[in-house]
Image: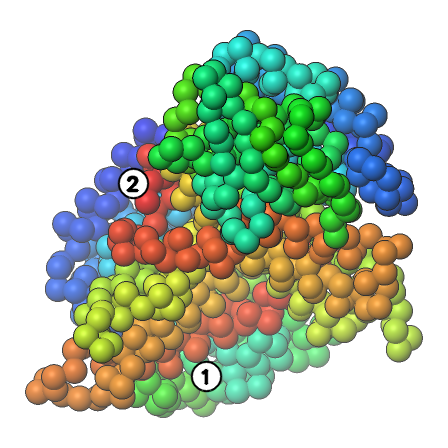
Amino acid sequence: MRLQLSPELASFREEMRTFFTTQVPQEIRDTVAARRDLTKEQLVESMRTLNAAGLAVPHWPVEWGGRGWTPLQMHIWREEMQLACVPEPLPFNASMIGPVIAAFGSQEQKERFLPATANIDIWWCQGFSEPDAGSDLASLRTTAVRDGDDWVVNGQKTWTTLGQHADWIFCLVRTDPTAEKKQRGISMLVFPMDSPGVTLRPIELIDGGHEVNEVFFEDVRVPAENLVGEENRGWDYAKFLLGNERVGIARIGATKRLLSQAKAYAREVTVDGRPLAAEPRMAARIAELENELLALELTALRVVAHSTDGKPHPASSVLKLRGSELQQAATELVVDIAGPLSVSSFADGGSAVPDWARVATPEYLNYRKVSIYGGSNEVQRTIIAGTILGL
Amino acid sequence: MDFTFDSEQHDLREAVRGLLERAYGDAEHRRRVTGTDPGFDEKTWARMAEMGLLGLPFAEEHGGMGAGPIEVAVVAEEIGRVLAPEPFVEAVVLAGGLVAAAGTDEQRAEVLGGIAEGTTLAAVAHAEPGTRWSPSAVAVTATRDGDSWTLSGVKEPVLNGARADVLVVSAVVDGGTSLFLVRGDAAGLTRTGYRTHDGGRAAHVRLDGTPAELLGESAADRTAQVEQVLAQARIAYAHEAIGSMDTALRTTADYLKTRKQFGVTLNRFQALTFRAADMYVSLELARSTALWASMVQDAGGDVVAAADRARLQTSRAGRHIGKEVIQLHGGIGVTAEYSIGHHTSRLTAIDHLLGDGEWALSRLAADVDAHDTVDPLGAPYTR
């Protein structure tokens, strides 16, 4: 048992740190540090910078741009990226559809899509959730009916994140409504968002931003060759994809970064002439969050060190559950530090309220999502109780 | 980076587990043992000595095994798993640790050798009524007369103080706190033993001009050494608590699968399974932190800070799990006949013996501005 990184891993970490802090444009990292939304152009530029250096999709098969890294190297890559305020590679491309096509797509699909996906020449969005199929995803109702060489798609998707930027969608559709188990009659189709019959409607969120959408399909014709893998096997691909999504969802590096920023904010705000950071209750709250984050980071290291043949460790549900709670606790802390300043969310450039206090509440409200997406925390508790405790 | 036991540590764990499960697999036996003085089983203690456990962390030239904090952690976790009442952490890590840290070579060879062989039960008389978790003595004073010393004052609670063959006593000297050895049969030593809520034994110890042997060459201030050894004991206690929490959670999960209410087993109720899942989260986070603290100690890092971090996490987890396992059992959970409540009792004792979570948190909070982020990897951890 030994905590220190090997010299090789220590220099790997240094290499990552140097790249992220010197090669990704400062302005992009400043935007992330300021916790402001990135533009589409910034996200694309950042991912292409990573891709040019072979750092956008290191977990893919080597043949398609992967690096064959160990889980611990992947962990270090991700944490250093977050600590350096580098936007993570677009998850829909890098963690979701890319690995699915690499694992289950035809050779033709791999050649057609994978390089473009790694370089974000295609911006993908996810068409999974529906109004009546969230955590119970298998209840989805969007249908695809075979008509000659095409599939004809009808139905509705929702919570389609950043769909307004997307070129293509990967979509779960019901292809066999008579299947005995509802999971068995689902397939995965990919098609362009500008196909006739696709309509996108933005959903405004409580943080005032526009990040998710509803997507409607009316007689959308999708060529048969756009079926990923086999017909009626879509559920297997979705489970594979969601398993990938859970890894790295704890975002420990990002929360660590936010806590260190929170300390700086608490030194900036004064209470009766003394810095808020000097209040014992505030100092204790920050210290406790730091300790919980340390415990989570150590648990993540245990999990990555023990994960074998690429399968997620059963305790990875702990990472999603606790990681999301700590992300939320950190954003709540920042709102509390901002105090009355936190109401000035939509003040313009002429406001005397510092920028960090203005973004505090929208971020806090937006972060309610992290205990819902990627398998809600209740789903994670069900997994822990069932697969680990045998209940 | 490596979180796995090597083969020797694995074998050690299996051997200790075998010994302690034979001794305490039957909870009734533990009740009998803790119901009779000295509150632990001298035969089991002797077997632990034979196995080399009682000299585990001491240097080989002092009769020990020369093992490190990971091996200590392995033993402590197994102790906690079955709630073995044998005072491993108290006698070996704490009392032995102080002698190892402050004693002369002669004292080390004698006292540590005796502890390792199981012939000397050592106890630490450090806590004083009205004080909390200080590394210093407050009211017990040491007086010098030529080459000899006498001690006066009251120490309490002194774990295993009545049974101990030798007491390691802290006392106020000019400019600080020194450590002394007091033999069980010393003149002017009064020990009144009693049972603690977790089945252990403690004592009120009165020193009244009691002759004592200075530990070490000089009456130097030992506060920093006491703080170091207390930190090592806190980490060992964290592992003992992990073992106890692990058993308590597993016992509760088994209970939920068998106990029926409203015609179905309790694991059919999501309100209960979710609470069990949350306990698992608490346990694994505490386990990671305790393992990390042992690795920091092993690497020669800042053991005091690491112990505070492990203490905070384990205290929170111990309270969470200790309370929930009783609630999920229902009424049987608060009966003395059933095992689960004894885990809660022991977890509560561990929490309060050397500094609880709030206390550790206040120490960490005082330091929170001294670093930007906490990085557990790489060089030995410092604040």
| Residue A268 appears in the figure | yes
Confirm whether residue A95 shows in the render.
no
Q: Chain of mark 2?
A: A
Quadrant the N terminus of chain B occupies: top left
Tell me the residue at 27%/66% (across/down).
Answer: A277
Q: Picture coordinates of residue B22 (x, y %)?
A: 85, 32
**Which residue bears the numbered disc 2?**
A13
Q: Which residue is mark 1?
A: A158
> Mark number for residue B69?
none
Residue drawn at point x = 47 percent, y = 16 percent = B147
Structural crowding at the residue carrying mark 1, measured as other residues with C-alpha within 10 Å and reported as few (<14), some (14–19) or many (≥20): many
> In the image, is residue B179 above or below residue A200?
above
Which-is-in-front pick, marks 1 and 2?
2
Badge 2: residue crowd in 10 Å (few <14, some 14–19, many ≥20): some
Camera-nearest residue between A254 and B255? B255
Res A270 quadrant in image: bottom left
Circle 2 — which element?
helix
Residue A61 in the image: x percent, y percent?
A: 41, 46
Residue A340: give x, y in percent of width and height: 27, 86
For the residue pair B344 and A291, the one nearer the viewer reads as B344
Q: Quadrant of residue B34?
A: top right
Answer above or below: position of B258 versus B126. below
Q: Given the image, on which type of amino acid does mark 1 rest? A: Thr
Tell me which label, 1 or 2, sits earlier in the chain.
Answer: 2
Q: Quadrant of the C terminus of chain B?
A: top left
Please say which color scheme the image uses: rainbow
Q: Mark 1 falls on what kind of element?
A: loop
The answer to whether marks 1 and 2 sit on the same chain is yes
Q: Amino acid at mark 2?
A: Arg
Kindly identify the residue that appears in the image at 30 percent across and 88 percent down: A208
Q: Going by the image, does A161 lie left or right of A275?
A: right
